[in-house]
Image: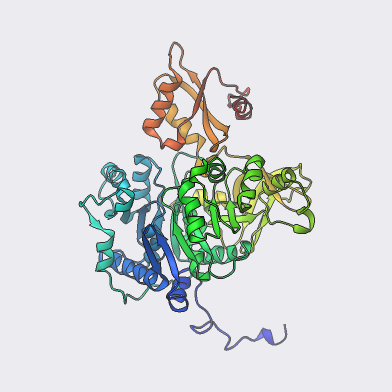
Amino acid sequence: MGWMADETGLEKCAANFVPLTPLSGLRRAATVFPNRIAMVSGDTRLTYKDYHESCTRLASGLAKLGVASGDVVATLLPNVRAAAEAHFGVPACGAVLNAINIRLDVHTVAYIFGHGEAKVVLVDSAFVALAEAAIAEMDGDGPTIVEVPDDAAGFPASDRYMAYEALLASGDPAFDWIMPQDEWESIALNYTSGTTGQPKGVVYHHRGAYLNAMGQVLSWQMTLYPVYLMVVPLFHCNGWCHTWLMPMMGGTLICCRDVAAKPIFDAIADEGVTHMGGAPIVLNMMVNAPEEERRSFDHVVEVFTAGAPPAPAILAKFEPMGFNVTQIYGLTEVYGPVTECLWDDTRWDGLDTAERAAIKARQGVTMPFIEEVTVTNEKLEQIEMDSVSDGEIMIRGNAVMKGYLKNPEATREAFAGGYFHSGDIAVQHPDSYIQITDRAKDIIISGGENISSVEVEATLMHHPSVSLAAVVAKPDEKWGEVPCAFVELLEGADAEEAEVISFAREHLAGFKTPKKVVFGELPKTSTGKIQKFALREQAKTL
């Protein structure tokens, strides 16, 4: 081994080893870019000096409320200023951020509050009733509510709780951030429905959040001072880590409370947006926007899109409007995106629109910060890269979750064989590009939201007239996919489609509610297993 056999005196120390964390990006930005605009939220414009002070006050204010290192602070917020500040202020007081999907139903929010043991929750005034109902349903005390009003959006304070600005005012601008002593420390907790009705808590560490954020700088080929439009909800994989990314580049965050065509076009034209992310439904919405909601602009906007692959017809219309689209792929368990359909100009620049769109629909190759993404058979052997053989997408690297909170069995199963098992079925092309062909565990992705078919089925089975229910994805022009329910009724029972849909809506979030119900005997195997593949084919014709 030569001289490396003796490393006496070459130990880690404070000078040569610092745990990786995205918190360091904002601390640096406050010094390097103090007067650059860090965030635009409505009429509010914050410099990096302002942004850093606000996050510092938030950390201090939370500490004064009794939040200690390792505690959980939840949010029920759309993409507003407080949601972005929570991504730094919460971990800066040593706590773990739990950004909760604002579209969830009361029962699920109550479960998440209890399972994650949130001590405080920052709640937009529009969702105070949701938080109150969830806390009322819990056994014991729930989290302390801090209300985040938005007068400009028509959601003034209820005056029943401490307001966000009051929390900031209570904080010390000189508060010393609690930086991680170990980059394995938890930074965020995100809940995913997975394939069961019970949400699973996905735990992120500081190292993974840092590497994912920094790696996407390379994937997006970013230069200094990007202007990023926050369309991806910050409760989805922490906005794909993009909020943690921006301070590293001195970038500007443009908050997008309402995902609609007009505010998106306005932001691109008025603020010079250079980058944005979003599900294919966002692209579809913009393509079909009426002329009065559109704005002209003279630059190209780089777009990451994920979920169901965008339809080639949409890409063909969307890109000429001034956008360059890159399909990415990932899951909550891997901090958001881990593959990208990296464009090979030596092979594909000359292709016609339809051929380009077909290639852009692939999930692509491993991003720079992840160790390996591949497709294997049941023996964990690499499949043939022949565009035909299929297997399960496997992921390994530093941007894979720590595991599922309080669920070691599910964690062991997810990590069996030294890979994270995605549950997604794909082929690999000869150039190694991955393309999903099916979702092994029947997850429905509707407008970028994951829907568990098992959860919807379990709800439908509570209807007094339902004997069996199976839910599959039905293709939808607007949402990509929507839930379609196939229902067997009890002998002698009767029910109408509208009645079943209404019943489901009473118990589920709106986006999880079936949009079509078909009555009849369900196709089954000889052992009684429902043949979902046959139902999926039928759903395509409805």
Name the residue: 42% across, 18% down: 465
- Quadrant hosting residue 536: top right
Q: Is residue 353 left or right of residue 27?
A: right
Q: Is residue 323 left or right of residue 293?
A: right
Looking at the image, which is closer to me, 427 or 305?
Answer: 305
Coordinates of residue 23 in the picture (x, y in percent)? 45, 70
Coordinates of residue 205 in the picture (x, y in percent)? 48, 63
Q: Is residue 192 left or right of residue 6?
A: left
Using the rendered image of the protein, determine whether residue 231 is visible from the camera's viewpoint.
Answer: no
Of all residues, the one furthest to the left in this rendering is: 160
Of all residues, the one furthest to the top in this rendering is: 492
Q: Is residue 203 above or below residue 20?
A: above
Looking at the image, which is closer to me, 95 or 123?
Answer: 123
Q: Is residue 182 above or below residue 400?
A: below
Coordinates of residue 384 in the picture (x, y in percent)? 78, 48
Q: Is residue 79 above or below residue 289?
A: below
